[in-house]
Amino acid sequence: MTKEKIISKFKPFEKITEVKFFKKEIKGEQGLALDIDDTIAFTFGCWVNALKEKFGDPEKLTPEEMVVKYKLSQFVPYWQTSEVSGFIENLRIDNSLQVNIPLIENSNRVVQKINKIIPIKVYITNRPGCVYDGTVKFLKKHHFPDLPIILDSTGTHQKEGAKWKANVLKTLYPEIMGIIDDSSSLIKELEPDYEGVIFHYNHQEKCSDKLNVIPCNRWG
C-alpha cells in the first residue's frame, strides 16, 4: 500500500475518538506516535508566567529554569493546591491559549525529518477533546505533519492522563510501535511487558531498565 493511500484514509488532522477503530484502519502498517505538550509545544513554560503572577514564585525562576528544575507543574512543591489545580485546568481548556503556546525550538523541523525515515502515524495527547480546534491551529501554524489526533475525551484529570495514554499505547501496539514523549509518568504507567519504544524527550538518562526507553535531550 502506498503512502498516499495510507494518508487518504483520514481527513486532515482528523480527531480520532475510537482507538480500536484507528488500530483497525492502520492494520498492517507501523509507525510512531508523537506527544504535543512539552514535547513540541512549550506548554508548561507558557503556563509559568501566569502561575507566577497569580500564585507567586519564591525561587524567582524563569520559565526555562523552571522547566529544567521541575519539568512539569505537578512537581513544583509550592504549586500543589486545589486552587492552582483549578487554575491549570482552566488553562487546559482554553482553545485560544493552545494556538499561541510557543514552539519548542527545532521540533517541527526535526519531526518532518523523522517522518521521512520512520512514519509518524498519530498525535496522542492528554489534552481534553474540547481544545481540538486550538490544537489543530497550533499544528498548522508550525507546519507539523497532517496526522490524526487522539485526545483524551474521557475527561481524565491531568494527573491521571499518563495512565490513559499508557492504555492507548498498549492498545495500538504493534501498529504504533512507540512514542516520542517527555513524560516520565507515562513510563511508570507502562507495564514491563510493553514492547514498544519510548523516545524520552528532554531527558538525558534512561529511567527504566524494564522498558525500551531512549533518552533524547533536545531537538536537533
Image (cartoon, helix red, strand yellow):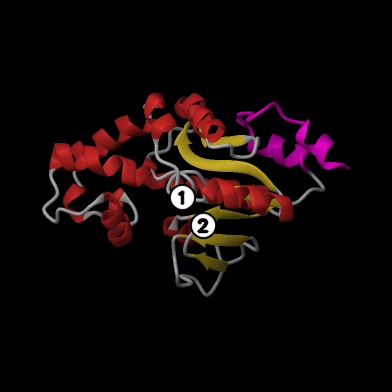
Residue kind at label 1, given as amino acid type: Glu
Which quadrant of the figure has residue 178?
A: bottom right
> Which residue position holds label 2?
219
User: What is the crowding at mark 1: few (fewer than 14 residues within 10 Å), some, or many (at least 20)?
Assistant: some
Q: Secondary structure at mark 1?
A: loop
> Which residue position holds label 1?
105
Relative to 20, say whether 64 is above or below. Answer: below
The magenta region covers 1-26
Q: Secondary structure at mark 2?
A: loop
Q: Are marks 1 and 2 in contact (CB under 8 Å)?
A: yes
Among the two numbered marks 1 and 2 on one chain, the one whose residue lies closer to the N terminus: 1
Which image quarter is the N terminus in? top right
User: What is the crowding at mark 2: few (fewer than 14 residues within 10 Å), some, or many (at least 20)?
Assistant: some
Which quadrant of the figure has residue 148?
A: top right
**Camera-side residue: 13 or 101?**
101
The Cα atoms of the two marked residues, 1 and 2, are separated by 7 Å
Report whether 45 appears left or right of 147: left
Residue kind at label 2, given as amino acid type: Trp
Which x, y percent locates residue 137? Answer: 51, 28
Residue 136 part of the magenta-drawn span: no
**Camera-side residue: 184 or 18?**
184
Which quadrant of the figure has residue 77?
A: bottom left
Tell me which residue sits at (49%, 71%) in the image: 208
Residue 31 visible in the shown view: yes
Tell me which residue sits at (61%, 65%) in the image: 193
Report whether 69 appears left or right of 159: left
Residue 23 part of the magenta-drawn span: yes
Which x, y percent locates residue 88? Answer: 29, 37
**Camera-side residue: 7 or 88?**
7
For the image, the number of numbered tags is: 2
Which x, y percent locates residue 207? Answer: 46, 70
